[in-house]
Image (cartoon, helix red, strand yellow):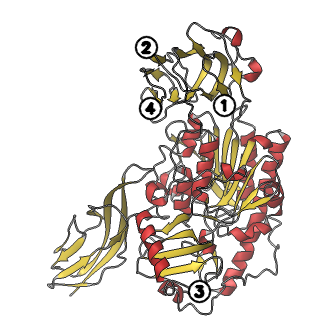
Amino acid sequence: MFARHERGLVAWTLAVWVLSAGCGGGGGGGGGGELPIDQQLRGRLFQVQDGAALSAALDAEPCDLTFGALTATGGPLTVVAPGVSGLDGFPARVEGEVTIEPPSLLVETSTFDAGGHPDLQPGLTVHWTRLRTMARGELVLQREGDPRSFVSGAPRKRPSFVVILTDDQRWDTLYAMPLTLQGLAARGIQFSNAFVTTPVCAPSRACLLSGGFLAHDTGVLTNGAPNGSVVAFDDSHTIALALRRAGYHTGFFGKYINGYVGVGPYVPPGWNEFVADRGTTSWTEFTLIQGESNATSAQGELVGPIDGYLTDYHAAKTLEFLDQHGDRPFFLLFAPNAPHGPATPAPGDEDLFPGYVYRERAFLEPDVSDKPAYVQNAAYNVGVEDEFHRDQLRSLQALDRAVAGLVSALEQRGQLSDTVFLFTSDNGLQWGEHRLEGKGVPYDESVRVPLIAMWGDGAARTDDHLIAANLDIAATVIDLAALDAPTDGQSLAPLIAGTPPSDWRKELLIESPALGSNRPLLWSGLVAERGGRTWKYAEYGTGERELYDLLGDPFEEENSAAALPALVNQLGALHATLRGLAITTESAPPASVGLAYSLQLETWGGVPPLAWSVEQGTLPDGLTLDPATGLISGVPTDEGTSMVTVRVAGQALGRYTGEPQSFAVELELVVEP
């Protein structure tokens, strides 16, 4: 964020310490250079020159102070913070100090660890030109022997965030949300080239909550076991927790990660207010889990059953949340069920779109001979799906009103210009294109999503950069909130500002390592910009490949994989370096009693050596799994059927989990007489 400055050596010592535990007030240590109360450091950024002294009140907010290169000659330059009060349950007592030995010119990164919770880092963090502290009290910066101060540059207030994450919403259905278009798109940016990296609910949501990491980095690859659901998600260091410890007031309302119904009244770490659906199947009579957590998870309260309309209930809760954050910036994640099935319309919306039928793009594509076998074998129920499409559009109306309500509420509070809105979906949905329904496939209707960004009252515009919505939204929040957190995403901030970087991504990994729990549809691929065109490449565990020119063939009707082998090989080679570890063997041939049996389990991705294990179940008597090669072999002794889950782990670590990347497959092993 900050440019390096080459400075001459200056002999001086900078001391930082936190005085008292009170909030507000100007006091102490800065002499005539004290900041007035109306310029208190509440998440604002100040440029401070060498030799400056600065005193300012802190009100439970992190503060960034940017300095020129800190130098030390003739003795160490020491930064100390002997007393810090706690904040919202996060221990904040600083242990230790940072010392810069001469002739150091820059402090790259040094972090004070809080007692017992080094992962939280709520104490004082020193970057080479930035000091950050989170505390209630007084921050005093003073050059030894010189109380004079000089402050320049306007303060920058950290923005608040409203992230709206819909469920199974196609990118081309925003026309059915006129209030959202008026409230957000008309003064913001619509991203026309936004995709999700894994077009399935649980992985996509985990990608966002993790802070913008790919599915094979979070370990949540699908909605259920053995490769996904909420139980596979490590929630101990999410973006919510990072924001909470940075002084944000955090709130979650709606659908969490699939499988949440099975973990009890559980509130993940990092949420001031958490209201989540408990496996909702009815939108008019539902049960919720609500509660609050700090640095660790908490036991929530079971609420319900509640009679009402689900989207309206959550919308009302989001408005209540806006009244609770005080002067602190907030992070609001609103994750309605709409328009996911059953897509129940709100009262009064049941008869909307009466004559709507969808017959666009590659609907019931007549010739799918160039498509993979699963497409050629697909069956599509036109009549049933037509009514469902109408219900999806109807269910969006209550959400449309909810978005307008949030915009209006923030406008009335005078906070709209300080709030970043980010609107997207966890994935799209097939509406009969290529004869398919559902999601989890590489076609645009499944992987392309709506994305609107609005910050302040600007003019409507469209941006066609290649976006990974479930990664880049989190990266944007991390950037604008000045969090010190890694991510696989790229911040949208320069695109929002109209200053796109020249090195923006040219390719994007898309993957669905396991759609089903028993018979996964395994594929992985790329969206890549090459030669002024955008290409879609997909490779399946079966060995089948697809290649589409999204400019010349936007409906993906002509598979060009056979016609363009050089491009297929180029994209395939790049894709092989990016994809995660997966077992490509989807089924086991039958064995026979008394006859030698051999099944080599195959993989792609991952870093060898690989380690294989039976995670659940038992192999038939007489068969064994080689832990080094993944070979199931032997001579079975008894007939019968065994269900086993086999897992493989590689040497590459998930960038979010820090654990070895792994993948599991459920196999049915039948031994015949």
Q: Say which element carries label 2.
A: loop
Q: Which residue is mark 2?
A: 75
Mark 3 belongs to which amino acid?
Glu
Distance between the alpha carbons at the discs numbered 3 and 1: 53 Å
- Residue closer to the observer: 55 or 94: 55
Which circle marks residue 558 in the picture?
3
Distance between the alpha carbons at the discs numbered 4 and 2: 32 Å
Distance between the alpha carbons at the discs numbered 1 and 2: 32 Å
Q: Say which element carries label 1.
A: loop
- Residue closer to the observer: 399 or 245: 245
At horizontal 59% and vertical 72% (from top left) the residue drawn is: 531
Q: Is residue 444 visible?
A: yes
Distance between the alpha carbons at the discs numbered 2 and 3: 71 Å
Q: Which residue is mark 4?
A: 117
* Left or right placement of residue 645 versus residue 336 in this view: left
Instruction: Return the x and y of residue 2 as percentages of the image width and height.
Output: 59, 36
Given this view, does label 4 or label 2 mark the residue nearer the observer?
2
